[in-house]
Amino acid sequence: MSSPLRLILIGLSIAIASCISTPSPVASSFWADPNAKVAIVLNTGPEHAYVYEEGSQGLLDLAIASAAEQSIRKHLKQLRPTAFAGVADTFQSRLTADGATVTRPPLVLDKHDNPDEWRRILNLTGADYLIHLRLKRFGFARAYMGFIPVGEPIAVCDVRGQMIDGTNLEVIWDTGSVTGAVREAVIGEWDQPPDYPNATETLARTLARSKKLLVDQFFEGRGEGVAVIGGAENARTANNQSPPKKFAPDPKFERRKEHMKQFETADTISDLFTTNDHPYKLVQDANLAMLANRKADIGGYVVRTSATADGSVIHLRGNKLSSKKETAAAREAFVELMILFEENGINVTRVRVTKNVNRNGFFLETDRDAYALLKANYPQL
């Protein structure tokens, strides 16, 4: 490879990597702050729901696809993400209950990752911390090859949450640019003009899940901080009361961290060499073409599943081409399954992650029929 081409590829890789940020829990210093003043800024995102085309398309392809889907696009213009504003209410009530002083300025961040914008809001509000909650995408994603759809629409709500420390403009909480992509397949028929009831209900459910994701990711990590913040702490000190109790580590948060680490450190096996007979004999929902035939939505990650005859070994295979977003979604699906199996007394004895240039997935070896539980909790799409 020539040196100029190599430099171009390296530059592109750096540019792509710079757009991907990993999740980080709330810094323990925030929960320990006895005088927390917090400003919450909400960006409600698109004015209405959209269709987001995914795949390789030219301008003519886009025009043809848009014309072919006029009915659903007209309906989506009537769906507005007004319910997303409720997430700021939840943040305010929970932080206030913990003793923080919270303000909700009627402002938006014009440039989302710009320290000058962060400083502008902090100066206007007099807050020490800025929480920014943003809805980035709201609608349905659909894969295309040219102007031809190659899959059914998937409800999508992409959100992101960040908190900035006003003393140094450091980001001390971030959901990351990938984790906030909440997706859900429509159960049943989606093409039901003119009101599209199944699709509309799925999108509302996806929006609710995106709000819950922001709340869970912010508050579940309080185990490293103190029990209250703000005025309640000062009141204790003034009255010579005992110092605030520490939060006990949140079991759910600790389990998620443990399982995420387990996924990242698991054995890997190339998907190029997996068949219905190797490394396991897959019988349930297996076929020659895909190895896994049953389609399900697990935590917003659409997968195809199969299993051995006794259901003790489960194979989950990505439904789309690999990408950083798909890898993150596979990890979230893995964590959700691990917690489900734990809560039902099923032990996962081995994890093997399958990777290649085309798809991601994993095998789970368990001590009993785990596939029946999976099918009972995640209906076939």
Image (cartoon, helix red, strand yellow):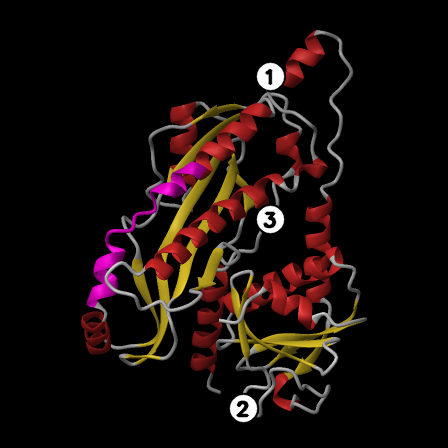
**What SS does tag 3 mark?**
loop
Residue 283 percent location from the top left of the image: 67, 86
Residue 243 percent location from the top left of the image: 76, 19
Q: Is residue 145 visible?
A: yes
Which label is found at residue 24? Answer: 3
How far apart are labels 3 and 1 at the CA level? 27 Å
Question: Which residue occupies the foreground of this view, 225 or 141?
Answer: 141
Q: Is residue 66 above or below residue 181?
A: below
Residue type at tag 2 = Ala
Question: Which residue occupies the foreground of this view, 231 or 187?
Answer: 187
How far apart are labels 3 and 2 at the CA level? 39 Å
Foreground label between 3 and 1: 1
Q: Main secondary structure of the magenta part?
A: helix
When asked about the image quadrant of residue 315, the answer is bottom right
When asked about the image quadrant of residue 221, the answer is top right
Q: Is residue 71 magenta?
A: yes
